Amino acid sequence: MSRHVVCPADELPPGSRKVATVDGREIALFNVEGRLHALLNRCPHGGAQICKGVVTGIAKSAGPGDYRLERHGEFLRCPWHGWEFELATGQSWCDPRSTRLRNYEVKLEAGAELVKGPYVAERYPVTVEDAYVVIDL
Amino acid sequence: MKMPYAGAIDCDLHVPAPSMAQLLPYLNDYWRDQIVNRAIDRMPFAMMSYPPNAPISMRADWRLQSTANPLEALRAHVLDALDLKFAITNVIHGCVALHNDDMAAALCRAVNDWLRTEWLDREPRLRGSILIHPQDMSQAVAEIERLAPDHRFVQVLLLAMGERPLGRREFFPVYEAAERHGLVVAVHAGSTYRYAPTIVGWPCYQFEDYVAQAQAFENQTVSLSAEGVFQRCPGLKFVFLESGVSWLPVTMWRTDKTWRGARPETPWVDRWPSEIIREHIRLTTQPFDAPDPTAVAQVLDRIGSDEILLFATDYPHWQFDGEDVLPDGLPQAAVRKILIDNALATYPRLAQRAIGGETAAIKEDVR
C-alpha cells in the first residue's frame, strides 16, 4: 500500500469532483458535503468513467406506488447504464456480492503531518500550512 | 416419458365447455329471460383462441361422439389411464370477452356453478377454477368470496390477453382475495381480442395467434414483476397454463439485465426479478416447446429451478400426448417434483387435502 497526495484540499471543495491519475490509474474523487470518496474511474460493467455519474440518493419503497429517495448523496449512478453504487463502499446496490467499484481510502491530512513522510506527492509540493487530499493505493 | 407412478396432479385439464342451454338452469330469471329472448343462447360463446373444431382445440382421436358421456371419457382417457390424484379443470368460456360487465359476471357465476354441480360433485378427483370477469374487479372479488368456502375450487382463472396487463393495480383486489383464501391465480392462454394478439398487429392465421401466446405470457411476467404484485401479495402464486416454457429463461435474463439500470423507476422491486419469478410463477408442462431431450434439460437448467414446472395433460387440446405424459430429458430428480410435489407446494388447497385436512364442501347461497 502506498500513500499518495493527490491534490490540495481546496481543489476538492464540497459538491465538487475531480479525476486524479495515480500510478497510471484514473481515480475519481468526490467531495459530498465534506465526505470524501475515491473510486477507480471505471464502471465494472461497461467501463464508463464513473466520475461523470450522478451523485444522488437511493430510491426505496414500502410497496407499489410508494416512492422515497433516501440517503441523499450516498450513491452514484453510472452515466452509461444507470447501475447504482454506494459511494462509501463501491458496492453495487443490485448485486452487492459480485459487483463493486474499486474504492480507496481517502482523507484530508495536514501538510504538517505529511512532510514527515513517507508519501508520494507526484505533482504537488506540500507545504506545512495547507491541507491535502491523500489516498492509499 | 410414460407416467412412472400413480398419484400425479394434472394442473390443466379441460372439460367440454358448456353450451348456453346447459348454463340456463344456472342463471337467475332475469338473465335467463335476457339470454333467451335476445337470442343470445344461439351464440356459441366459444373462445376464438380455441375454435371448437380446430385441431388445436381437440386431438381428433379424443373427440367424443355426440352420444358419449364426457365424464366417462375423461375418466377413461386421463383420470384412470394415468391414475391421477387430482386434476384441475379450466373452463375457457367466451363470456369473459363480453363488454356488458353484469352479463359477463352472471355467466361466470353460471359457468362456475355448472362446473361444481356437473363435474366436481360427480368426480372427487376433479378440482375447479373460479372463472372471473376480468373487467369488473368488484364483481370478480364477489365471485371469489362466494366460492372460496368450497375448497374444491383451488384457483382463480384469467386469460393471458385482456384489456390491461395483469400487474396493473386495478387487479390487486382480486389478488388480495385470492391470497386471503389460499387460492392460486391461474392464467390460461387465450385472448379477449380487445387488441391484436401480437404486438405488431393482426396476424392472418391461427397458427400465428397460437405462437404469439408465449409473448403474451412474457409480457405478463414482466408486468407482474415490475408492478410489485408479489411485494403486495407475498403469499400469492401464479400458474401459467398452456404458456409454453422455453421463453422463460430469456425473459428472466432480459428482465434482470434491464432492472439493474432501471431499478429506481420501480423501487418496490427489491431483488432480482428472476428471483421473484422463480418464487411466485409456475408454468405447466404442456406444451413443452423445446425440441429434443437435450434442449429440455437445457431449458430447465437455465430456468435455474426444478420447482417451477407443474405437470399438465392439457386434455383434450392437441398437446395432450396420451400416455406420453412428460417430455424426455428432464432430470430424474425433477420428475417427482413436477408430477406431484410442486403442485402441492403451489396450491395450498391441494396440500391441505393431501394431508387429510379437507374442509367439507360448503354449500352457500347463490347470489
Image (cartoon, helix red, strand yellow):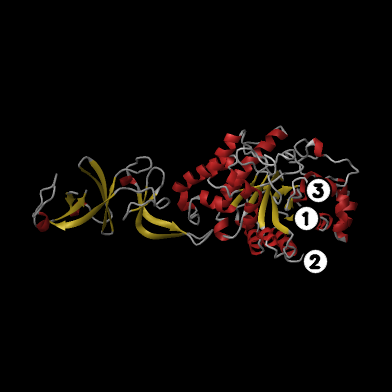
Give the foreground label among 3 and 1. 3
**Observer-nearest residue: B197 or A97?**
A97
Residue that carries the numbered disc 2 in the rendered image? B363
Tell me the CA gap for discs 1 and 2: 18 Å
Same chain letter for marks 1 and 2? yes
Tell me the CA gap for discs 3 and 1: 25 Å
Q: Amino acid at mark 2?
A: Lys
Estimate how packed mark 3 is, as few (under 14), some (14 to 19) or many (20 or more) residues with alpha carbons within 10 Å.
some
In this picture, is B159 found above or below B328? Answer: below
Chain letter behind tag 1: B
Q: Is residue B278 left or right of residue B327?
A: left
Chain letter behind tag 3: B
* Residue B195 percent across, percent down from the top left: 68, 42
Give the residue displayed 77% in from the left and 42% down from the top: B316
Whichever of labels 3 and 1 marks the residue nearer the N terminus, that label is 3
Residue that carries the numbered disc 1 in the rendered image? B108
